[in-house]
Each structure stands twice: as C-alpha cells, then as structure tokens.
Amino acid sequence: QKEVEQNSGPLSVPEGAIASLNCTYSDRGSQSFFWYRQYSGKSPELIMSIYSNGDKEDGRFTAQLNKASQYVSLLIRDSQPSDSATYLCAVITSGTYKYIFGTGTRLKVLA
Amino acid sequence: GAGVSQSPSNKVTEKGKDVELRCDPISGHTALYWYRQSLGQGLEFLIYFQGNSAPDKSGLPSDRFSAERTGGSVSTLTIQRTQQEDSAVYLCASSLLRIGNTEAFFGQGTRLTVV
C-alpha cells in the first residue's frame, strides 16, 4: 500500500463548477497535510496546509481533513481554465519530518 | 532571499561525469529537502537536512549521490559518475519546520540531462 494515494485522473470539470480532489494516507499518526499545484514543466506551488480535522478555506480553495478516515480533500470552487494542473497531496508522517507526496491528480477545467 | 533558489536551471552532462546542483533556501528556514521528479512521475524523496545535519538520507538512490549543507543555508547535491537514469528534475524545498508551521516551499528545480 502506498503511503499517500491519489487518483491520477484526469478529472475533467466544466468552467465554473466545483472540482473535488481526494487523497488518502496510510500513517494514522500523520499530523501535517498539504496541497500543491504543479503546472506542466514547473515546480510544485503550495496552495493549502491543514493540521486539524475539519475545513479550512482560502479564497476559492477549501481543504478538508478527516483523520479518523485518513483522508484529505481539496475543493476548488468556480473552477477556471487556469486551474488546470496536477494537484499533489503531501503528508508529513509520524516520527519523521519527511514530506511524502502522492503521485498527483491531473485536473482539466474545460472552458 | 525571497524564495528558494536553485542553480543551474538546466544541466546537460555526459555519462560518467560528476555534477553539482546547488540550493539556496529561504532565509531563516532550518529544514531543507531534496526531491527528484522523473518525467511524468511523482516526487521521490532523496534527503532532508535540519541545520547542517541530515537526519534522513534514506532516499539517496546509490552511493554516487551525496549532499551537504553548510552554515545552515546553502546545500549542494553531488552526483558522481552520472548515468542516464539520473536524468530528472531535481527539486529543493525549504521549511521553517516549527509546530503549526511546517509548510515547505520549492525552488524552480534543476533539469538534469545525462547524454
């Protein structure tokens, strides 16, 4: 079992819709969770961090964390074509300060 | 500096040559990470520094790979006797790594091509 799992996609949504990206992790002791956006040929860019159960909103982005179910999600409201990218979920696992990344979900927002 | 800076941006080298990749982290960030991303693949952890020491170097693929960090700042990743499978984008990230603030920020990467 991979430590951090994401559906590779592509996830296609129409412009203006809500895009929902999901991530599960295997280490129940993980405490820190992150979403990164990576455009083709570019380096990952941090979108959100979340440390506590529940929702965290920042503009059009909402991160949701459920430690009991070991999943973290990212909602993008009013999706724009410029949101088309690969979204990477990252987790700091317990006992280490190493960031473990999922393989990413490719999002396509259709104009 | 304002962000994580990596140099060179691109490096083409001949098989068997040694290369050095440099990372200059965000000022004040104590933690520094090296990752590798092959074409179309995910991020592969290589090594992590806290200050000048490397508590976790478990991701280094072979003894041809080494890294050091001096003055709690700049880090250099060295690949000796490069092989074609070393071709990838090498990414550096830094973090304050404090409780409640463990966000890591990436540099633009070094694209290494071994011919």
Image (tube, coloured by chain):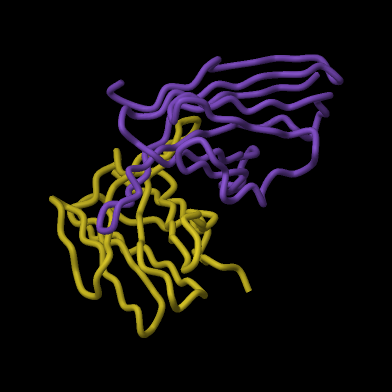
Given residues A96 and B79, the one toward you in this image is A96
Given residues A77 and B101, the one toward you in this image is B101
Question: Could you tell me residue A103's position as x and y percent?
Answer: 54, 55
Given residues A11 and A72, the one toward you in this image is A72
Chain in purple on the image:
B
* A28 w.r.t. A15: above or below: below
Question: Could you tell me residue A85's position as x and y percent?
Answer: 40, 43
Q: Residue B5's image quarter?
A: top left
Instruction: Tell me which residue sits at (35%, 62%) in the image.
Output: A32
Question: Could you tell me residue B65's position as x and y percent?
Answer: 73, 34
Question: Could you tell me residue B46's position as x and y percent?
Answer: 62, 44
Given residues B66 and A87, the one toward you in this image is B66
Quarter of the figure that contains the C terminus of chain A: top left
Chain A's colour is yellow
Quarter of the figure that contains the N terminus of chain A: bottom right
Q: Residue B53's image quarter?
A: top right
Query: Is A93 on the left-hand or right-hand side of B35?
Result: left
* B114 w.r.t. A84: above or below: above
